[in-house]
Image (cartoon, helix red, strand yellow):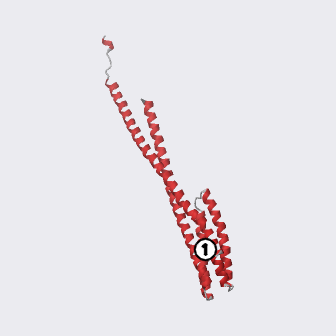
Amino acid sequence: MALALSFVFLIIMAANWFVSYSMTKVSGQFKSVYADRLVPALDISAMQERYYQNRLLLEEHLLASTGEEEQRVLQEMAQNEADLDSLLQKFRATYLTTQENSDLQDYLQAGKDYAKTQQAILDMSQAGDKPAALAMFRQEGMAAFQELLKPLHALSQLQEKVGHELYEDAERQMTSLKVLSYLVIAMAVILALLVGTLLQSSRKLTNIKPQKYHLN
């Protein structure tokens, strides 16, 4: 009975340790969903917005008729570029899967190509060759812009996919914890029954009156 009692106690201790470990893991998964999936998804969306803004500003530069207007556009574009650098550094500091690293490298290369094309268009515009700059904006500029958006879109989709996988894993962990909690309750009931049995046996042994063999 004592061995059975010790065995049940060890099972309860092991179950409690596993519950604590699983809760820590689930907590980490939910934190990862927020820090490594939700926030980066918002950052990618902000990056796409900055690129669209710069695309519109570049067109404004091509249509500008005064130097002051061109300078204003360049300043706004420079601010957007600074925001893009900050968002990129923030994104790179998060946990990245192998596929995300691959898409990130594609984005970096596409970003360099687009920056070169954008600068070439600006140089033509500032040199006064507006028609040629506008033609390049509509052809090479549009093609480079679309190539830039592809890896950003892929990264955005990955945030949803990986986040969903983390959520499903957390759901499985919570289901396991629920089953384990029922097991712990059952073990606790068994432990209580064993203790009750031991106490009852102890009382019976205590109540047995010793025989007076010396009277025989």
Q: Where is residue 90 drawn, in percent x and y?
A: 58, 66
Residue ranking furthest to the top: 216
- Is residue 26 in view? no
Q: Is residue 123 left or right of residue 79?
A: right
In the depicted view, which residue is nearer to us: 63 or 139? 139
Question: Which residue is depicted at the point 49% across and 52% down?
Answer: 168
Q: Is residue 214 left or right of residue 29?
A: left
Label 1: few (<14), some or many (≥20) within 10 Å? Answer: few
Q: Is residue 115 left or right of residue 182?
A: right
Question: Which residue is depicted at the point 56% across and 70% down?
Answer: 48
In the depicted view, which residue is nearer to us: 23 or 103? 103
Question: Which residue is depicted at the point 63% across and 66% down?
Answer: 107
Residue ranking furthest to the bottom: 66
- Is residue 46 in view? yes
Q: Where is residue 66 drawn, in percent x and y?
A: 61, 89
Q: Where is residue 84 drawn, in percent x and y?
A: 59, 71
Above or below — where is 103 with respect to 135?
above
Q: Quadrant of the C terminus?
A: top left
Q: Is residue 27 left or right of residue 106?
A: left
Q: Where is residue 176 drawn, in percent x and y?
A: 46, 46
Above or below — where is 61 with respect to 19?
below
The residue pinned by badge 1 equals 82
The answer to which image quadrant residue 2 occupies is: top left
Amino acid type, label 1: Ala
Q: Quadrant of the N terminus?
A: top left
Report the label total. Answer: 1
Mark 1: secondary structure: helix
